[in-house]
Image (cartoon, rainbow, N blue to C red):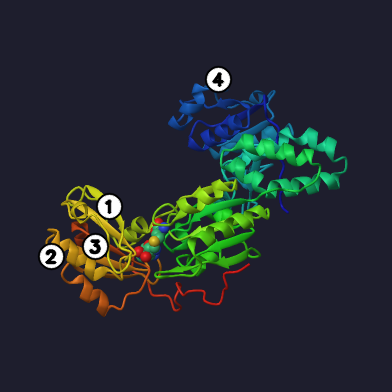
């Protein structure tokens, strides 16, 4: 290690910043965030980036040239005047007094260097490349930002409130460590992240009173996995995927996404293919209840958004009836994701002011849709699960007054490397789709916005070698 990371206690102390520009303002901001007072020494006016800081009563601007007396009664010194000779002079004066000093971009004039910071106070993560590759540490910081929930600080604060009672219950360090490990990995943490702090506090109290580490019922995370491309997952989805004990997923969840779940989590395939529901919905609902009652954190992972043609509502109704806690994580639904990746804006001032999402799922071979509502002008219609009924769809729309040259597209495996787009009109699409041998999942978009595809198409993937949507046939749906 070239540098020893330490965390300075600066609350109520004073820091000196020499310089009135943007870089100096960033240092002043950090000091103020750490609860310090700031003396800024700069003969000229301060840059606009100081504006917000100047409004606080924590910053004093001395319109003077730096003198060693400015170091009196300060705890830490930053120099970023932009004048090398002056910065060096600040360094030498501070160094002579053994004050910690940092000169921006001049490692040779630094007794300490500044890390990239992830602030989830009271949790603070500092990342440094020892000055070798600052951009790399910023990139690493960005990755950590995605892993550490915004509410992490609230979890730490909750743990802080329980510090004394836990110490009473568990006199040994080992006992306390075990308790906290279990508590912080239990659904209690997720309760805090989901804003249910009182419930978390209550559960923690109960766990403590039981003086053991037993956790009653688990929790179900109903998580949308988006339309297939792992880049489109939400941070929240990814976090829950990486901590669930068991993953219950269906056919639309692409293998690359499944691979991002916790390695040692049990996986249970309850896939659904049209007309061939592998596990009936009622049974899926009860599987979720059973697993949660075993105390497990259950990830119910669904393609797209769970509340859009995802039967997520039914699943959580059952959970509610059985008193199983749950939370829902929204996701990019196929219409939004697939349309974006196909360069088809779903609304556009010149084309469509309304958007209708419908399912084209055939029930007993027929399609029960409100055709008059669908066939109104100046709107875009997106049809989920419509591949099999494509001929009927196009026929009915024409029958209900839609011009037969209305642009229409069908997109298979949108957003993924295997995305395939066929465009045509209500007249031509069925034959074109048949020629292209499209297979599910495929989405149909009807409306004048489809004509924009030729101009706006931006995603040109090279097809992946293997089929990312293969059905995991070899995984039995029993546990
Ligand atoms: N809850 C999901 C929809 C489930 S219904 C969501 O919000 O997206 C399943 C249908 O979604 C498929 O038949 C298909 O019409 C559509 N779909 C899902 N992912 C798709 C993709 N990547 N490309 C094309 N269509 C997709």
Q: In x, y percent, where is residue 105?
A: 57, 45
Residue on which disc 2 sits: 404
Q: Badge 1: few (under 14), some or many (20 or more) residues near its Cα, within 10 Å?
A: some
Residue on which disc 1 sits: 356
Give the distance between the C-alpha atoms of the residues marked 4 and 1, in whole angstroms.
53 Å
Is 225 positioned to the left or the right of 344 in the image? right
Residue extending furthest toward the right:
172
- Tag on residue 453? 3
Secondary element at tag 3: helix
Q: Of the residues under marks 4 and 1, which one precedes in the sequence?
A: 4
Q: In x, y percent, where is residue 467?
A: 44, 76
Q: Are marks 2 and 1 in contact (CB under 8 Å)?
A: no
Give the distance between the C-alpha atoms of the residues marked 2 and 1, in whole angstroms.
19 Å
Residue on which disc 4 sits: 57
Look at the picture and state if 143 lies above or below 106: below
Q: In x, y percent, where is residue 43?
A: 50, 25
């Amino acid at each position: 290690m070239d540098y020893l990371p330490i965390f300075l206690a600066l609350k109520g102390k004073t820091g000196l910043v020499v310089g009135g520009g943007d870089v100096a303002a960033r240092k002043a901001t950090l000091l103020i965030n750490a609860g310090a007072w700031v003396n800024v020494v700069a003969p000229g006016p301060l840059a606009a980036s100081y504006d917000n800081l100047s409004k606080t009563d924590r910053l004093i601007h001395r319109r003077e040239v730096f003198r060693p007396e400015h170091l009196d009664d300060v705890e830490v010194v930053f120099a970023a005047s932009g004048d090398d000779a002056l910065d060096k002079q600040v360094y030498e004066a501070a160094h002579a007094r053994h004050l910690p000093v940092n000169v921006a971009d001049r490692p040779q004039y630094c007794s300490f260097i500044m890390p990239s910071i992830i602030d989830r106070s009271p949790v603070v993560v500092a990342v440094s490349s020892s000055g070798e590759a600052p951009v790399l540490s910023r990139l690493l910081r960005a990755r950590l930002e995605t892993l550490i929930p915004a509410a992490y600080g609230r979890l730490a604060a909750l743990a802080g409130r329980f510090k004394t009672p836990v110490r009473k219950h568990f006199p040994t360090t080992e006992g306390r460590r075990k308790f906290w490990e279990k508590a912080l990995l239990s659904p209690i943490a997720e309760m805090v992240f989901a804003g249910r702090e009182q419930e978390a506090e209550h559960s923690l109290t109960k766990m403590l009173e039981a003086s053991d580490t037993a956790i009653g019922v688990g929790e179900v995370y109903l998580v949308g996995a988006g339309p297939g491309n792992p880049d489109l997952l939400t941070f929240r989805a990814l976090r829950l995927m990486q901590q669930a004990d068991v993953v219950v997923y269906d056919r639309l969840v692409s293998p690359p996404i499944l691979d991002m779940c916790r390695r040692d989590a049990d996986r249970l395939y309850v896939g659904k293919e049209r007309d061939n529901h592998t596990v009936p919905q009622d049974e899926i609902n009860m599987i979720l209840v059973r697993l949660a009652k075993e105390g497990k954190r259950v990830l119910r992972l669904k393609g797209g958004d769970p509340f859009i043609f995802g039967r997520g509502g039914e699943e959580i109704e059952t959970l509610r009836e059985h008193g199983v806690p749950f939370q829902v994580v929204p996701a990019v639904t196929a219409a939004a994701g697939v349309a974006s990746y196909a360069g088809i804006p779903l609304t556009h001032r010149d084309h469509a002011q309304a958007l209708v999402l419908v399912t084209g799922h055939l029930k007993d071979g027929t399609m029960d849709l409100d055709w008059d509502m669908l066939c109104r002008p100046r709107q875009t219609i997106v049809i989920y699960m419509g591949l099999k009924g494509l001929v009927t769809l196009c026929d009915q729309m024409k029958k209900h007054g839609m011009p037969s040259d209305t642009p229409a597209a069908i997109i298979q495996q949108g957003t993924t490397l295997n995305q395939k787009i066929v465009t045509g009109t209500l007249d031509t699409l069925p034959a074109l789709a048949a020629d292209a041998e499209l297979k599910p999942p495929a989405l149909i978009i009807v409306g004048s916005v489809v004509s924009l595809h030729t101009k706006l198409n931006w995603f040109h993937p090279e097809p992946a070698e293997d089929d990312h949507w293969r059905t995991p046939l070899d995984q039995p749906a029993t546990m």
